[in-house]
């Protein structure tokens, strides 16, 4: 690992609302690892899903504005926990490399664009800049006995020519970080399948079936919890779990953590710094089950 870097931090709109626990646990974990996150001053919405479906120049301008502010603050790397924000920020950086496209964006922003910063997810920064070995060195309470399935969703690593991180079909970064935290990672065959994304409002029936398939498969593998890096995926799997159960006729109660929450637990950070109380499916039963499993395994090994 090189010396911990300073990053321009883009929390995204969900980070201050529906995924507040992702934001606070991200900040807590990065601080514990010595990473400096500097919020982009006066940042604004990246346009999320709707903007680029209407106008690519407008969508690019929304994200380029944030990158421009970060560049003017002298920050060379922007990081964000949200894969949707990540997609928009990275796409904007690539779009303005086209001179004609850049002119359209500069007109919308009333000024010329400087060289824009590099953009990476917090997951990528933790995995590539910090490294799983260093993460393991910070573990004070390993997640021994906790069986998890890592769910990346469909855009964290795709399209690969934009995201440029990990394997687009079989990503492993989150798996490795969870293993570094002491958890047992169960191979999850649906780790990049879509959860239905923002169709949760317009087509709840579609999302219920897609999330139901993910939850049911994870349950069939015997995991204690799902782990994700996406606010929308987490919401669909956690908040809408009852809808998925109703659609499939199941009764699953599987907690859905952000990977930063589990890293924080392994670092022995206080629960209030990780927002565990924000999860809809109470995670404490799964955590206690894991502790009992680890203790039973230890007793068997000592008496063998």
Image (tube, helix red, strand yellow):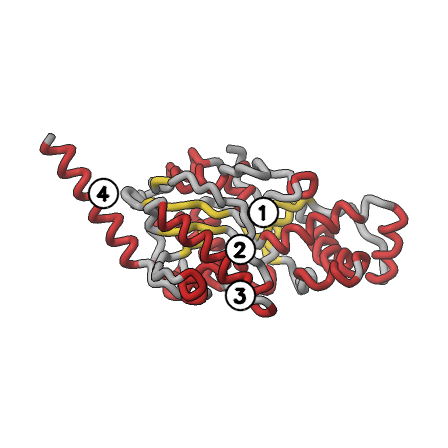
Q: Gap between marks 4 and 1, in whole Å?
A: 32 Å
| Mark 2 lies on residue | 195
Which label's residue is closer to the chain start, 3 or 2? Answer: 2
Q: Position of 44 compared to 249: left or right?
A: right
Q: From this view, report whether residue 281 is shown above or below residue 122.
A: below
Please give the label number shown on residue 205: 3
Q: From this view, report whether residue 164 is shown above or below residue 12.
A: above
Q: Residue 21 or 205: which is nearer the viewer?
A: 205
Which label's residue is closer to the chain start, 2 or 4? Answer: 2
Please give the label number shown on residue 294: 4
| Mark 1 lies on residue | 156
Residue 181: x, y in percent? 37, 42
Badges 2 and 4: C-beta atoms under 8 Å apart? no
Q: Position of 254 compared to 239: left or right?
A: left
Q: Secondary structure at mark 3?
A: helix
Residue drawn at 40 percent across, 58 percent down: 274
Q: From this view, report whether residue 77 is shown above or below residue 201.
A: above
The image quadrant of residue 104 is: bottom right
Q: Position of 93 compared to 281: left or right?
A: right
Q: Gap between marks 1 and 3, in whole Å?
A: 24 Å
- Neighbour class for label 4 at 10 Å: few (<14), some, many (≥20)? some
Residue 48: x, y in percent? 66, 61
Q: Secondary structure at mark 1?
A: loop
Residue 207: x, y in percent? 53, 61
């Amino acid at each position: 690992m090189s010396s911990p870097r300073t990053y321009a931090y883009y929390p995204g709109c969900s980070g201050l609302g529906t995924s507040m626990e992702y934001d606070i646990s991200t900040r807590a974990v990065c601080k514990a690892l010595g990473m400096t996150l500097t919020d982009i001053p006066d940042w604004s919405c990246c346009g999320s899903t709707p903007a680029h479906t209407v106008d690519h120049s407008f969508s690019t301008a929304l994200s380029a504005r944030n990158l421009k502010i970060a560049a003017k603050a002298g920050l060379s790397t922007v990081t964000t926990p949200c894969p949707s924000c990540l997609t928009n920020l990275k796409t904007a950086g690539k779009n303005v490399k086209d001179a004609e496209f850049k002119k359209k964006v500069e007109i919308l922003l009333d000024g010329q664009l400087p060289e824009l910063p590099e953009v990476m997810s917090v997951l990528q920064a933790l995995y590539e800049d910090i490294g799983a070995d260093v993460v393991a060195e910070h573990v004070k309470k390993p997640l021994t006995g906790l069986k998890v399935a890592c769910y990346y969703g469909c855009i964290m690593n795709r399209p690969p020519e934009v995201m440029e991180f990990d394997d687009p079909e079989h990503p492993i970064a989150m798996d490795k970080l969870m293993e570094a935290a002491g958890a047992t990672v169960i191979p999850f065959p649906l780790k990049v399948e879509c959860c239905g994304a923002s169709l949760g409002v317009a087509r709840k029936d579609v999302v219920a079936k897609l999330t139901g398939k993910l939850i049911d498969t994870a349950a069939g593998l015997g995991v204690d919890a799902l782990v994700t890096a996406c606010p929308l995926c987490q919401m669909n799997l956690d908040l809408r779990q009852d809808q998925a159960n109703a659609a499939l006729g199941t009764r699953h109660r599987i907690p859905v953590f952000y990977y930063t929450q589990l890293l924080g637990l392994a670092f022995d950070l206080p629960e209030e710094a990780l927002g565990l109380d924000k999860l809809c499916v109470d995670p404490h039963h799964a955590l206690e089950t894991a502790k009992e499993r680890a203790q039973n395994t230890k007793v068997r090994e000592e008496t063998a």
